[in-house]
Image: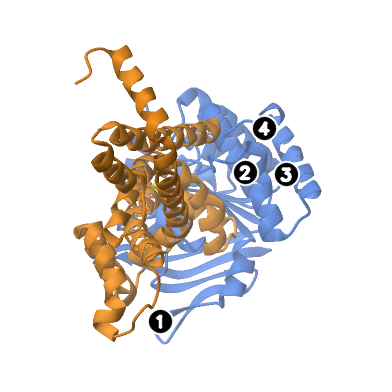
């Protein structure tokens, strides 16, 4: 079942065309990895879908409801209330976590549940503790983000996103800010989510991880999707020059 | 001239015993006025400063340009001149007599002046917040107002506490300017006392008053900074 659909998405920063024509569909329970060289527009794609950037063309819909679509050459966004509702069906995990430093770990997880979803504080706390135990962070509930390692921060950030029960979770290089020995614990959590059939779109430079965990790999360059398919077809047996050249840089 | 420290203290105590009855009144009311000006200025200028800061950062130039101009004028002209202007403007410009008392004029001028300085501090604090904090809040579905009140403002307050303590201590000393409108204050009381007692001891009194106030304020700010040090 199709959950997210991106049609002919375009985005420029000034004169620079960053996304020239991106179309893609994400099915429920699918795990997609997006790879590609720096500056190819991977982050911009996620940011347009999660409404952190305004698109210049095309359309994005979740389960048939349009966040925005093109009408007479102009992008028209849904009503504010509608956007708020639709946005909550997605979640985004940032490269540098962006935890709220003035809140305890627990409150990082409960604040939006209570004040955005209207969940009762007790229920929010219960959800938060469940997620923390899943992340192996039960003992950190009352800690503040500054006292956590990068890997722990990222697991809190993932739990914070999950606390709102999104149907699709986006990751923008979730391990790129981490020391190599800490990436493992974050990737393990994401892998576990994949096993639970969480729908995820992951921008990553971890090729081995992308191969293991994803149902589909998308290779982007210069604002277009160059190739997509099964992990082994893209990551191992690609016929495309650019893909092979890019992957060549990762072989050591 | 006082030769030794003990001699100085002795002189002060003799002086105090002799003149206390006469000085306590003016000093007392001077201190009371200073405290009132101080307290009311903070009460009004702290929130107004935040509003001014938001005005300065507004996207619409129609809002931001005049607000920036206001801040420039308030910071670019002497507070003493502003005091006189606020007090005399209603009469000289509009021909209205007794629009408000001297004390009210003092509070208006101080509030406007300090709101401008506070605004610059708030603005620095708000602009130092990383964009990721806004984005994380937005992605979690918080409204813009919620993001500002729950996520940005609390962190800004922690960041602006040190520059605020400077400004608030300056405010204590600036309260001495109210005498330009003939409102009583400890410094004026000291001047009067000095001229009829032929002594500098009254000046020392008022110095001690200001010093103690500043000392208490610094302590309070230190306490505040400590209380907010639970996160980084
Ligand atoms: N806010 C912005 N203003 C102007 N240009 C931007 C902005 N954000 C991104 N860009 C430009 O858009 C292009 C694509 O950036 P984007 O961050 O989407 O690439 P990316 O594929 O995520 O790269 P990386 O792997 O380095 O994260 C880059 O050339 C970048 O300089
Ligand atoms: Mg990126």
Q: Residue at x 48, y 54 (%)?
A: B135
Which of marks 2 and 1 precedes in the sequence? 1
Residue at which label 2 appears: A108
Q: Mark 4: which secondary structure?
A: loop
Tag 4 near tag 3, CB within 8 Å: no
Tag 1 near tag 2, CB within 8 Å: no
Chain ID of residue with mark 3: A
Residue nearer the viewer, A33 or B143? B143
Q: Which mark is residue A196?
A: 3
Tag 3 near tag 2, CB within 8 Å: no
Which of marks 3 and 1 precedes in the sequence? 1
Q: Nearer the viewer, mark 4 or mark 3?
A: 4
Q: CA distance from mark 4 to mark 2?
A: 10 Å
List x then y, in percent, for residue A62: 61, 67
List x then y, in percent, for residue A128: 72, 42
Residue at which label 4 appears: A142
Would you say B69 lies left or right of A68 here?
Answer: left
List x then y, in percent, for residue A225: 41, 58
Chain ID of residue with mark 2: A
Q: Are marks 3 and 2 on the same chain?
A: yes
Residue at which label 1 appears: A74
Q: CA distance from mark 1 to mark 3?
A: 39 Å
Which of marks 1 and 4 precedes in the sequence? 1
Q: Is residue A41 above or below residue B11?
A: below
Q: Is the residue marked by circle 1 packed among few (<14), some (14-19), or many (20+) residues within 10 Å?
A: few
Q: Residue at x 32, y 56 (%)?
A: B178
């Amino acid at each position: 079942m199709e959950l997210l659909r991106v049609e002919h998405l375009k985005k420029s920063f000034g004169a620079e065309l960053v996304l020239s024509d991106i179309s893609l569909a994400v099915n429920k329970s699918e795990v997609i990895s997006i790879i590609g060289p720096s500056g190819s527009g991977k982050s911009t794609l996620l940011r347009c879908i999660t409404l952190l950037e305004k698109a210049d063309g095309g359309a994005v819909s979740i389960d048939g409801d349009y966040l925005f679509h093109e009408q007479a050459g102009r992008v028209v966004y849904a009503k504010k209330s509608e956007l708020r509702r639709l946005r909550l069906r997605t979640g985004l995990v940032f490269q540098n976590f962006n935890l709220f430093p003035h809140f305890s770990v627990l409150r990082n997880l409960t604040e939006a549940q209570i004040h955005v979803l209207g969940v009762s504080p007790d229920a929010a706390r219960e959800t938060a503790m469940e997620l923390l135990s899943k992340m192996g962070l039960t003992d950190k509930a009352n800690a503040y983000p500054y006292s956590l390692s990068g890997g722990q921060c990222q697991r809190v950030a993932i739990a914070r996103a999950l606390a709102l029960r999104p149907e699709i979770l986006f990751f923008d290089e979730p391990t790129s800010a981490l020391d190599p020995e800490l990436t493992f614990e974050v990737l393990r959590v994401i892998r576990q989510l994949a096993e639970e059939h969480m729908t995820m779109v992951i921008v990553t430079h971890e090729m081995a991880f992308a191969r293991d965990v994803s149902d589909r790999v998308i290779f982007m360059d210069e604002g277009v999707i160059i190739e997509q398919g099964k992990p082994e077809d893209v990551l191992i047996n690609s016929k495309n020059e650019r893909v092979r050249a890019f992957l060549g840089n990762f072989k050591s | 001239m006082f030769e030794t420290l003990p001699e100085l203290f002795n002189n002060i105590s003799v002086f105090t015993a002799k003149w206390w009855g006469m000085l306590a009144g003016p000093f007392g009311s001077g201190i009371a006025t200073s405290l009132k000006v101080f307290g009311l200025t903070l009460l009004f200028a702290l929130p107004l400063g935040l509003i001014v800061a938001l005005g300065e950062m507004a996207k619409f130039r129609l809002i931001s340009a005049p607000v920036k101009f206001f801040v420039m004028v308030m910071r670019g002209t002497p507070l003493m001149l502003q005091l006189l202007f606020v007090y005399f403007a209603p009469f000289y410009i509009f021909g209205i007599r007794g629009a408000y008392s001297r004390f009210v004029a003092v509070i208006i001028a101080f509030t406007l002046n300090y709101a401008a300085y506070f605004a610059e501090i708030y603005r620095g604090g708000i602009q130092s917040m990383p964009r990721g904090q806004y984005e994380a809040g937005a992605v979690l579905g918080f409204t813009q107002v919620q993001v500002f009140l729950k996520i940005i403002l609390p962190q800004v307050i922690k960041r602006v506490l040190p520059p605020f303590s400077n400004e608030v201590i300056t405010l204590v000393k600036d309260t001495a300017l109210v005498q330009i409108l003939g409102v009583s204050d400890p410094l004026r009381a000291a001047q009067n006392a000095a001229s009829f007692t032929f002594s500098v001891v009254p000046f020392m009194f008022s110095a001690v008053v200001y010093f103690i106030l500043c000392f208490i304020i610094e302590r309070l700010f230190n306490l505040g900074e400590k209380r907010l040090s639970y996160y980084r």
